[in-house]
Image (cartoon, helix red, strand yellow):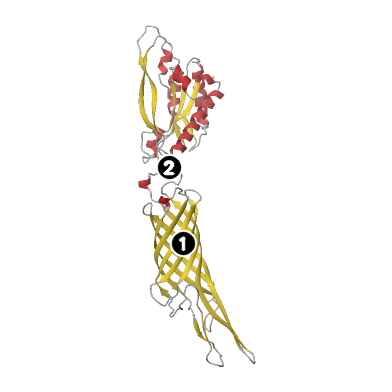
Amino acid sequence: MKKKITICFVCLSLLLVSLAVRGQDTKTTRRVPLQAEVTHDGLSEKESKAWEIGLGGSLINWSRVSVTGFRSTPDNYFYNLKANHLMGGANLYIARELNRWFYLDLQGSVGLTKNNNRTAGDDRKRDLLYMGGLGLQFRFTPLLRSQWVEPYLRVGVNYLHKDFASVYGGNFEDDPTGQAYWESSDIWNPDGRSSDKNSFVPLSFGAGVKAWLSNSFGLGLQGEYLLPVQKGLPHFVQVSASVIWRIGGKSKHAAPVVRYVEIEKPVERIVERVVEKKVEVPAIIDTMACDLLENIHFEFDRDVITATSERTLDRLAELLKSYPDSRFLITGYTDAKGSDSYNLTLSARRAEKVHAALIGRGVPARMIKWRGVGKRAAIISATAADNIREGDRKVLLERVTNMDYWNALDSK
């Protein structure tokens, strides 16, 4: 959709009345906030809480031992055991911001490894482990100066299911002595494991960090120690890394400081009197005024003037050149949606484009100056419909008669 830019004249009739009398200038002062804090999606902090969605990989430290062979010699018996300590897999992460300190998350992992303990009738090629559960994160972000790195602590409760047997010890088959017994252990289970279940509930205690590359994307790293509620079941650890997409929430850019300045705006008090001299007004003025008010457009969210508006600028340039002793200020405005810095830049670029277009059509540079004020003068709320906010998106052309004010303007 094209954004309509309206250009209007202030006091154009004075140029057509030769005996108009000006009143004295007065000045009004108002306090104007230069900047205000908004989130990166255009909503205030109170209206927007962040969602985080991540996808990545995980390593699960789950020790599994399998007997792979038996060999005897005249002096010894040899038994081959194979130990697997890690399961690789995928990890899904979803979190919702509760406040600056706490996030509620849902995490799920799928572990996958080769089945090295196949027996008769067991045709599974892979061992699978599924785990998922809720957790609560405590973020240290409010204590840090940077919003881009977020360390946290996490506690949670999970449901785990696996489709393989965790064998921790046993006798060897074909053992001629009948006395050989083997047992496995690892650093997470120094006292051994006395039972095996395919489904159980482990508690999670962990820590992690989020490193944000932008307001919307970042990387996550998390380590967890998982402790089953039931005794005798294996303890284990899991490490996950993921790419995270962030939706909503407070902008991570440094919050701008709201500063108020005193602005003195000259206001002309116009006094007109009727004179007997008849002034011939060219018929082009009515047509041109209509065009100026309704037919200047830019491409959506850009500073490119449309082809139709270029023809309107041709007529505007001819009109301005007919008043070489006048001075005009081109001011760009935007509606209230979006950040201050973005709107300020966009309004300035559009005002500059109109300025350059008029210069290119022969309007003397001494006659016109430009500036952009962003959304400072926007009247309609950012949450209003687009067709309503359209009235705040415009470029105004005003005639300046106070030469001290004209000279004080920052010429672009």
Circle 2 packing at 10 Å, graded few (<14), some (14-19), many (20+), is few
123 or 407: which is nearer to us?
407
The span from disc 1 to disc 2 (Cα, nearest Å) is: 32 Å
Taking 20 as reference, is 110 left or right?
right
117 or 334: which is nearer to us?
117
- The location of residue 173, given as percent across then percent down, is 54, 88
For residue 226, what is the image quadrant?
bottom left
- The location of residue 355, given as percent across then percent down, is 51, 26
Q: Earlier in the sequence, mark 1 or mark 2?
A: 1
Identify the element where label 1 is drawn: strand
Q: Which mark is residue 255?
A: 2
Identify the element where label 2 is drawn: loop
- The location of residue 189, given as percent across then percent down, is 46, 75
Residue 108 vs 355, above or below: the answer is below
- For the image, the number of numbered tags is 2
- The location of residue 118, given as percent across then percent down, is 54, 80
The residue furthest right is 74
- Residue pointed to by mark 1: 92
Circle 1 packing at 10 Å, graded few (<14), some (14-19), many (20+), is many
Kind of residue at disc 1: Leu
